[in-house]
Image (cartoon, rainbow, N blue to C red):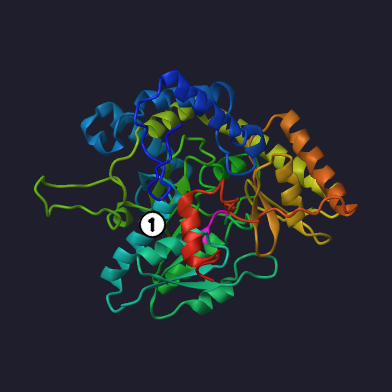
Amino acid sequence: MAEESAYKGLYKLPRVGIAAENVMTEINKLNSAMTSKSRGRLASTAFQGEGESAELVYAVTQKFMGWNGLFTFQEAAAAKMENEVLDICIGLASGGCAATAERGRANFTSGGTESNFCGLFAMRSWAREHKPHIDQPEIVVPYSTHSTIHKVARYLDIKVVTVPQLEDLSADMKGIAAAIGNNTIGIVGSAPNWPYGQVDPIKEMGELAMNHGLWLHVDACVGGYILPFFRQLGENVPDYDLSVPGVRSMSADLHKYGYAPKPCSTVLWRSQTEQAYHYMPITEWACGLYLSQSFVGSRPLGPVAGIWALMHHWGEPGYLANAQRLLEIKSTIESHCARESGLKTWRTDGPLLMIASDDFDIQLVVGGMEAKGWRLLGVITPPAIHLTIDSMTEEDLDQFLSDLSGVCEGIRNGSLNTEGLLTYGGVGDEGSAPKWLLSAIEIFGDHPHE
């Protein structure tokens, strides 16, 4: 639509504005080129909701999209929505139970990265007060810990001591205990971890943290707002939340299984004592106290209004019904893979599911499914397809399983030999990849920190 600049091939602003209907024509073309919801529900386009609920959420979000969430202290209606959603989140994280000395606290963030940043920043601030002898703080984490923990630690100049997983892919508690040293300020666990879908032994981590005087942060970005409902439905969910002694902070994404519009996440605190280390009040400027909810300043209020609407529309029965559907879909895929020659699934504690193979290269399955329009993520070590189980129609689920069987048959008979990418977010060809990513690869290579 816009013209390409002669200056180094840069795209530039059109010299003349384009009629709104023509802009929408182009937008509709771009939208239709995206992976469809039905083919992306098990990966990158998951957690969008469907039907009446989705229509409600996005209509409400649109009503408040222009409002700046930084200024909810000026709007009583905005504060009401924030307070009620955060209270619900604290309750789901067991932050108001008798096991805690003081009621839990929570803050909104933009996503898991910011939530984990807030948790580790508070941990470091606490350590500077309680462990002033440490010049180079360290955290001990299982190998399965999410990449954002490593990213955040680099920003905060915290050394990450990584402990390999056990043979069954679970966290090695003996290894974690042995890795604690004089510079350790905390431990990080996951509920569940992203690569393997297992809830780490948070109870044991909490005991270890208390015995060594450490801060335990739990990354529950995936499980925070689905595991409570799995547990109510009778699933054996290991203890992981603020009810566990030793857990001081926890990240949990509302825009995953809470079904909030993006961006919308939370960081939760055992009490106001821990939350105090999170805030960054600024007074050294001309306009008085500056204090924001979390790291970012301006943020859209729309997602908060959207999740407020969904929580009140669904209530507990709606979230339980959704959780029941997720368990049914997960079980159906597991049963299908058990019957499909060459495929197997890993044991997981929550809504994630990994498909692996001992008989052929699982990347061939990814490639074959991509050719059929399915957007899938992957795990590299060890190789597996990574599914984020989301609500699907029976028709879409049947199509996924049918396509999966067809791809496996193609691999077995040798007619299919195109590999797909087993990555968190694979890089396509230059024509489809964003320029910032191509630039980063040009600077660092495909694996800049290996």
Query: Looking at this rendering, what residue extends furthest in the right direction?
Result: 413
Residue 130, given in percent of the width and then of the height, sits at 29, 71
Placement of the C terminus among the 4 image quadrants: bottom right
Quarter of the view holding residue 37: top right
Asked if the stretch drawn in magenta spans residue 36, the answer is no
Q: Position of residue 291 (x, y in %)?
A: 22, 47
Magenta segment, which residues? 188-192
- Whether 28 is drawn above or below 11: the answer is above
Q: Secondary structure at mark 1?
A: helix
Left or right: 226 in relation to 188? right
In the visual, does 363 lie left or right of 60? right
Where residue 345 sits: x, y (%)? 75, 53
Amino acid carrying mark 1 in the image: Phe
Question: Can I make out residue 345 in this image?
Answer: no
- Answer above or below: position of 425 versus 300: below
Classified by dominant secondary structure, the portion drawn in magenta counts as: strand
Q: From the image, tell me which residue sits under label 1.
A: 117
Label 1: how many Cα within 10 Å (few below 14, some 14–19, many 20+): many
